[in-house]
Image: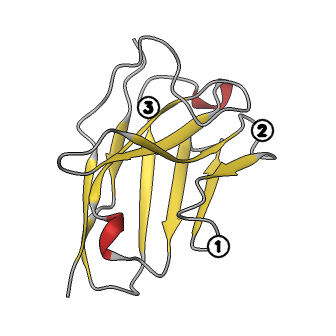
Amino acid sequence: QLQFVESGGGLVQPGGSLRLSCAAPGFTLDYYAVGWFRQAPGKEREGVSCISSSGVSTIYADSVKGRFTISRDNANGTVYLLMNDLKPEDTAIYYCAATKFRQLAPLPHTSWGQGTQVTVSS
């Protein structure tokens, strides 16, 4: 089944930046729209952003609009999330997954990977 590998997280001060990467080794990732999701302690998993298979269309949660940018390189089978002006409330484990058409929601039966930890703190 489709398995994603996330990387690029870390500890950053408020106002700083990180770039996350998402790949699915052994799969043709450009068949899929892909999204980033995050889960903070004690909270439900929420959608952050997603990008269409072609890279033309994107969706952003209101909380990250103007700060985060999603992109993809289909030749390398990688989806990126550039996070600027990070805030403490962005602290969470970030996951990527294939998404539904024009929706910031995972496909049914999504198998979540380990994710990558993003911590925003001074």
Identify the secondary structure beneath mark 2. loop
- Rounded to the nearest whole Å, what is the CA distance between mark 3 and mark 1? 27 Å
* Residue at the disc numbered 1: 66
Quadrant location, the C terminus: bottom left
Of callouts 3 and 1, which one flags the residue occurring earlier in the amino acid sequence? Answer: 3
* Residue at the disc numbered 2: 54
Q: Residue at x 27, y 56 (%)?
A: 92
Q: Is residue 110 left or right of residue 81?
A: left
Identify the coloring: secondary structure
Of callouts 1 and 2, which one flags the residue occurring earlier in the amino acid sequence? Answer: 2
Of callouts 3 and 2, which one flags the residue occurring earlier in the amino acid sequence? Answer: 3
Amino acid, disc 1: Gly
Label 1, residues with CA under 10 Å away: few <14, some 14-19, many ≥20: few
Would you place residue 90 above or below residue 86 in this image? above
Tags 3 and 2 touching, CB below 8 Å? no
- Rounded to the nearest whole Å, what is the CA distance between mark 1 and mark 2? 22 Å
* Residue at the disc numbered 3: 24
Label 3, residues with CA under 10 Å away: few <14, some 14-19, many ≥20: some
The percent coordinates of residue 41 (x first, y second) are 18, 50
Identify the secondary structure beneath mark 1. loop
Q: Is residue 30 left or right of residue 98?
A: right
